Amino acid sequence: MKLRRFATQELATVYVAAMVESLITRESHPVLGLATGATPVRLYDRLVEFHQQGLSFAHVTTINLDEYVGLPATHPQSYRRFMHEHLFDRIDIPLAQTYVPDGMAINIDDECERYDAVLDTYPIDLQILGIGRNGHIGFNEPDISLKTRTHVIDLTEDTIKANARFFPDVNRVPTRAITMGIQSILQAKAIILMAFGSDKADAVRRALSGEVSTEVPASFLQMHPNVTFVLDEEAAQQLQTGQLLQASEWSRPHPW
Ligand code: F6R
């Protein structure tokens, strides 16, 4: 487990963008696991800038974590549309190499199976994650048990409230989503979890507490051999010195 703390979100984001660049310039067929939400927006802006300076994404495959059930790809709040606006339409990645669950699939169970097959075909080299205020990753919400593979989930009230900022009102936020499961996330060769702002501080502290609990899905990341938490000062503010030291071992090099 590595922990990198930066004075600002901007600096943290440049660090992560450089990690992504390093992967895609070294690998001939890199696979990136991607997230949506507010946290990675600036990362995608930086990657677009890198692209404008010559970085090509033509050989990259991307696999997104999740999608709302019931929103078509064209809906302004769908995650497919988000990815087009913030990244895909601004770089040279062939769209056939971009995977996002289909929230409009007639048979959702089949869609989950299709997505698992995609994940089996394209093992993720680097998974980018945000974290929910309740400790969720992807849309793996706190519960008494967690699902390993791609599945449909009922979003918690906290997540619906948090995501209402992107919708005209809270009643328009979908209540279900398709999400990659915990095992699929942990199968990525390397994982970077980005968290910014004081409203993530509690979730970050609980994720790094030394205990693994289904009530804090992000805590499962402690079991992965190559995870980096990339935080700004505010998201790191509840970490104790001991926790910071323990989490900061430069234990393993990245696999690329
Ligand atoms: C989105 C996702 C979620 C978000 C999390 C944080 O694809 O997987 O787990 O990363 O809800 O969202 P923001 O970044 O909006 O605070």
Image: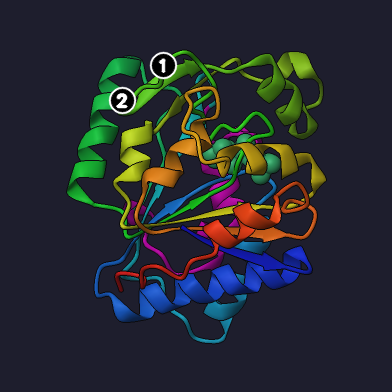
Residue under pointer 2: 112
Give, as a single range, the part of the protein colored magenta. Answer: 72-97
Residue beneath the point at 47% across and 51% down: 34
Give the amino acid at mark 1: Ser
Is the residue under label 2 in contact with that under label 1 (CB below 8 Å)? Answer: no
Residue beneath the point at 24% across and 52% down: 123
User: Which of these two is toward me, 189 or 98?
Assistant: 189
User: Is residue 47 shown to the viewer in this render?
Assistant: no
Q: Position of residue 199 (x, y in %)?
A: 79, 40
Vertical arrangement, residue 151 with respect to residue 132, above or below: above
Q: Is mark 2 within 8 Å of ligand 1?
A: no
Q: Position of residue 235 (x, y in %)?
A: 74, 51
Looking at marks 1 and 2 on the same chain, the residue that comes earlier in the sequence is marked by 2
Image quarter of the C terminus: bottom left
Looking at the image, residue 138 sits to the left or right of residue 253; the answer is right
Residue under pointer 1: 145
Residue beneath the point at 48% across and 73% down: 19
Image quarter for residue 178?
top left
Q: Distance from label 1 to label 2 (Cα)? A: 18 Å
Colour pattern: rainbow
Tell me, for residue 224, which label it has, or none: none
